[in-house]
Image (cartoon, grey):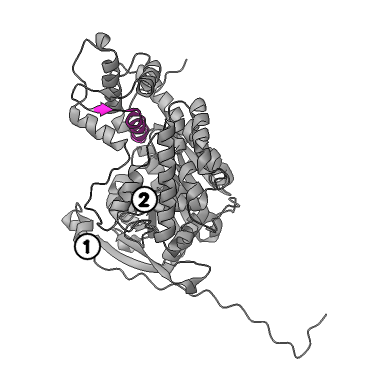
Amino acid sequence: MAPSASAAPATKAPAPKAPAPVQWGTCASSELVGVPPAELPLYSCANYAVPLDHDKPKLGTIDIALMRRAANDQSAKIGSLFLNPGGPGGSGYRMPKSGKNIFEPEVLDRFDLIGFDPRGVARSTPLRCFATNEDAADVFGRMHPLPVTGQQEKTTIKAYKDYGEFCDRFAGPLLEHMSTKDVAQDLDTLRAAVGDRKLTYVGFSYGTLLGATYVNLFPKNARAIILDGNVDPKLRLLDGVEYDRQRTDGGFQYALDNFLARCDQDADCAFAGNARKKYTELHNHLREVGPVTLPDGTVADEAAVVGTTAGVLYNPEQFGDLANLLQALYDVIHPAAAARKAMTISSQDVKALLAAGKLPKTDTRPDSPYTSDDSYPAVNCSDKPFDNTIGEVPAIADKWERQIPDFGRYLAWGDPAVCPVWPVDDPDPYRGPWNRRTQTPVLLFGNYYDPATQYEFARRMSKELGNAQLVSVDSFGHCILGGSACTDRIAADYLIDLALPGPGTVCHPDVQPFPAATTD
């Protein structure tokens, strides 16, 4: 049917308003400690306002803190390279300072490196659940890192409930806008605000979920996206308990089993000699008998040893120290076999390793302002759905311990405990679809023995995304860029020329902590 003569002519919808450009300025001198004097002029910093709620921009704004390291060769600059370290809640602000440790020199020649603290984190508008360090120390100090007894479980559950109540009281409106979808919308705003038509991005660990969310929200705005240490976005946004169980079993437990197997193949590994059996015996002793006191007087309990082991699995450079610590502990419970020999690890290294495995205990002046942030649970509890109550966590921990004896109980008392009491009503996370196609394939790296983001998650990510290619890495540790000449070369070629390696490419780390398993 023809339109009537009086019909108004069709009009185009107005184009979205371009965001204001970032106003770069001088960085605080304290933020540039360690930068060579000749490179100081390359650095600039800024705070940039983004909407609290991108769907309702009139609700107000929050600030995002950014640091930029300008490309060495501005005449050949391709654009900006945004970086995210993971977490969630990790500060990416200073990441441009570490560019030399992550990327090939030509990447620094061709890109401005941009680090930022995501919403809720550190220098950006922080998400804080406490007004004072005293209150925070009281709540966190009552959370047992590995509850075993009924009283420990009861005390820890009460502390988590108190945490939720403090957050409900003090966190403010930002609490409802901490999902990865919100961060991805911030990232697209920042992309435009620095003048880039399309996004070039490298994300590590949780930063892979941010990258996956971005390419599905803004597939046409993606230029080159690298994801290192991948999550399984579909499972993570579908079932928080099952995601964490698989992360524990296929990640931490698998990495430990392979650490112990590789240790037995290395004559220089201090814990060699049926290491798997020895670790189980040591763990059982810590649970059933109690803490072990080392010759230097250091006391190590079950929570410290399990936490230390989990933490060291992120960093293969510490594998030798972990083996020395485990053998020193084992020698104490077998004094005759050890013949009271001297420890093969220094007292200083023992204390450093064990300290990393304990929950932080704040020792601050009472009523001093709370300067940390609570972005880790704020993001995870906005993204990951948990159907359990906190009262069901002891039963979950019992079940996981039967299935995953070394880490099940320890890691069950994480997100499955805090998220059921997290006071968020409608965070509106992005739950898919995950298969929107980008013009250039997303480049993925996955380590075979990654504890925090198991290799199977990288395989799933490669299948769930609409256009992705996975590079496998025969390596321990969490994430790989900066630790393998093979992956670093592939990353540089991709970032600069959008070139991809052949399908099925397998890289190796520059240094193996133990020799590769032999094959017949």
Dot 1, crowdedness within 10 Å: few (<14), some or many (≥20)?
few
Amino acid tagged 1: Ala
Location of residue 423 with respect to 338 vertically, above or below? below
Location of residue 377 with respect to 30 vertically, above or below? above
Q: Which residue is mark 2?
A: 90
**Residues under labels 2 and 1: Cα distance?**
20 Å
Dividing the picture into quarters, in which one does residue 125 lie?
Answer: bottom left
Amino acid tagged 2: Gly
Give the prevailing secondary structure in the magenta stretch.
helix
Q: Secondary structure at mark 1?
A: loop
Dividing the picture into quarters, in which one does residue 367 lie?
Answer: bottom left
**Residue stretch in magenta:** 299-315
Q: Is residue 384 left or right of residue 19?
A: right
**Which quarter of the rendered picture does the N terminus lie within?**
bottom right
Q: Quick one: label 2 or label 1, which is nearer the N terminus?
A: 1
Q: Residue at x 35, y 58 (%)?
A: 116
**How many tags in the picture?**
2
- Residue 498 visible? The answer is no
